Image (cartoon, rainbow, N blue to C red):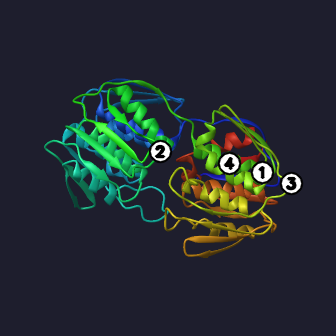
Amino acid sequence: MAKLLIEGGHPLKGTIRIGGAKNSVLKLMAAAILGHGSFHISDVPAIDDVRTMVGVLRSLGVGAVLQGNELSIFVNGVQGRPPERLVQSMRASIQVMGPLLARLGRAEIALPGGCAIGSRPLDIHLDSLSKLGAHIEERDGRIIATADGLHGADITLRYPSVGATENTMMAAVRAKGTTIIRNAAREPEIVDIQEFLNKMGADVSGAGTPVITVKGVPDLGSTNYRVIPDRIAAGTYAIAAAATGGEVQLLNVIPHHVEPLLRILTAMGVPIEVDERIVRVYPADRLHPIQVQTAPYPGFATDLQPQLTVLALKAQGTSIIREAIYDNRFGYTYELAKLGASISLEGNRAVVNGGRPLWGASMNAGDLRGGAALIIAGLMAEGHSEVVGLHHVDRGYEDICGQLQALGARVIRV
């Protein structure tokens, strides 16, 4: 099992480039199932989740090759079902259900896995697909969806779920008639998928707003596409810079995608400078405590909550972090206690007593973003730390060890 050895107490300094968004490219790969021909997707992060999705596509008879940060996909026929071991390793594999249903009239997948950060029910996905005309049943730990033909529908999501919005969009692009998705998720990755689908020949509008309209088309082709920058990776490195008192320049960032975090960092006293596709983070004289609650975009992202909680350990005073998306996302705080962190949990909120010294310790990553938070904590702490379970972090960050080394961090992967 890979782990990261960290010598803390050294400010991060320098420049790094942010790669393509994990939470977008996985869905673009699923969307390719709807088309035919050759796709070329660039700025693809070379992360484990992308490699898993390559395996999912190949299992369906789709050609997929990742070389560096370039992904080639060739779609001729689509058949079969993704292997259970692949589906259970990554929750995003649920996104092939909508495209398979639209293309083949049948989709069968194992209940998907991923990070253990609380219950993430699939009922919103399945309810929306049912309204498009699918028959859904669960049998022996598998979800089976069938349809003689999908039809447009007026669908209101009970919650603006990102995955359900994407799945519904992708199923609806080849349904007969018009589909309206209300209370849709508004994340930048939704807009990215709309642009990708439209370049394939779809007719989708409204992404980025609460109402998305999809006019079904009989066939889709292929396209070349560049993935948007990863706002969560950008936010992670911005927080790491602030946590170490460093000075870091982040290239290839869309500033308004990370604006919710930048507002919080500014309120904490972190000097931030923004240019076109560049964010610069400067050392703060003093960090102020905060009160923050996660929320769907354009609110503060739950995927940055663990990292921000670690930063609050450096603030002078008591911060309160509320988690309103997932019901079990504070598990990493038990590992932070090994460093001497003072965090008390009260239901869905963490009370962080900041300004206390942290000392190096061995910590175990239990999920992707929690693992990133533990690494930041190790960079903050005095002495030596190690973060075990780096495979969780590899699912979403490309070469995090190399990126941190480029910023002067004293880290070694073993």
- Is residue 389 shown to the viewer in this render? no
* Badge 2 element: helix
Residue under circle 1? 270
Question: Can you give x and y, in whole percent of width and height, for residue 105 in the image?
Answer: 18, 42
Q: Is residue 270 left or right of residue 209?
A: right
Q: Earlier in the sequence, mark 4 or mark 3?
A: 4
18, 56: nearer the viewer: 18
Which quarter shows the N terminus? bottom right
Q: Which mark is residue 285?
A: 3
How far apart, in angstroms, are the residues tagged by discs 2 and 4? 27 Å
What is the count of numbered marks?
4
* Residues packed near mark 2 inside 10 Å, few (<14), some (14 to 19) or many (20 plus): many
- Is residue 2 shown to the viewer in this render? yes
What amino acid is labelled 2 in the image?
A: Asp
How far apart, in angstroms, are the residues tagged by discs 4 and 1? 9 Å
Q: Earlier in the sequence, mark 2 or mark 4?
A: 2
Residue under circle 2? 49
